[in-house]
Image (tube, helix red, strand yellow):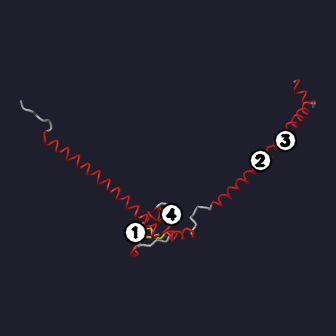
Amino acid sequence: MERVEVGGKGSHDESNLTAEKERESVESASFLCQYRHAFVSFRKALAMQTGILSGWKDIANYMGKGVRTVQRYERELGLPVRRPAGKPRGSVLSTMRELDAWTSSHPQPGLESQRAKAEAGGAQVTSLRAGISEMRKLRAQMTRLRGQLHHEREDLVGKVRGLPHAKRKKQA
């Protein structure tokens, strides 16, 4: 009797080749990931050493804003960025020192200082307390007036019932 192999020798080689390709793919992806991480770390270290930020993303991260916001600041408020070769679009550079100076001289729209917020909050609380106090006084006054109105109404009803005309209508 002959022995028959299922899948044959060629099938086994193909599966080994596929597994090897997948392993190489995973290894190269891992290497690329490590390389990218090292490159990003290098760029951050270089920026911290030289104080130069390159690209909208680095500038936006440094300022704590989004890329589009920083681009709008450049377009509308004159954020100091430099463009290599004087091109109107493309890559940009800026220094941390320039950005810090610009930020301190251009208060960002829509943002108040913490002190102004605290003062405004204190003024609002004072205003609310005064309003509540006035409301309580008005409520007490309204209660007093409602009681007086009730007594006067009772007096008036009693006087109306005492009239002779009112007695005739009741009897009829």
Camera-nearest residue between 164 and 148:
148
Q: Quadrant of residue 155?
A: top right
* Residue 85 percent location from the top left of the image: 38, 75
Say whether residue 138 is left or right of residue 68.
Answer: right
Vertical relation: 122 (above or below) 164? below
Q: Amino acid at mark 2?
A: Met
**In the rendered image, which residue does mark 1 sit on?**
91
Q: Earlier in the sequence, mark 3 or mark 2?
A: 2
* Residue 36 percent location from the top left of the image: 36, 59
User: Pointers 1 and 3 in contact (CB under 8 A)?
Assistant: no
Q: Amino acid at mark 4?
A: Met
Secondary structure under tag 1 reads loop
* Mark 1 → mark 4, Cα distance in angstroms: 17 Å
Foreground tag (3 vs 2): 2
Vertical relation: 158 (above or below) 46? above
Foreground tag (2 vs 4): 4
* Mark 3 → mark 2, Cα distance in angstroms: 14 Å
**In the rendered image, which residue does mark 2 sit on?**
135
Foreground tag (1 vs 3): 1
Q: Earlier in the sequence, mark 2 or mark 1?
A: 1
* Residue 18 percent location from the top left of the image: 21, 47
Secondary structure under tag 2 reads helix
* Mark 1 → mark 3, Cα distance in angstroms: 76 Å
Residue drawn at (93%, 30%) of the image:
162
Q: Quadrant of residue 32?
A: bottom left
Q: Amino acid at mark 3?
A: Arg
**In the rendered image, which residue does mark 3 sit on?**
144
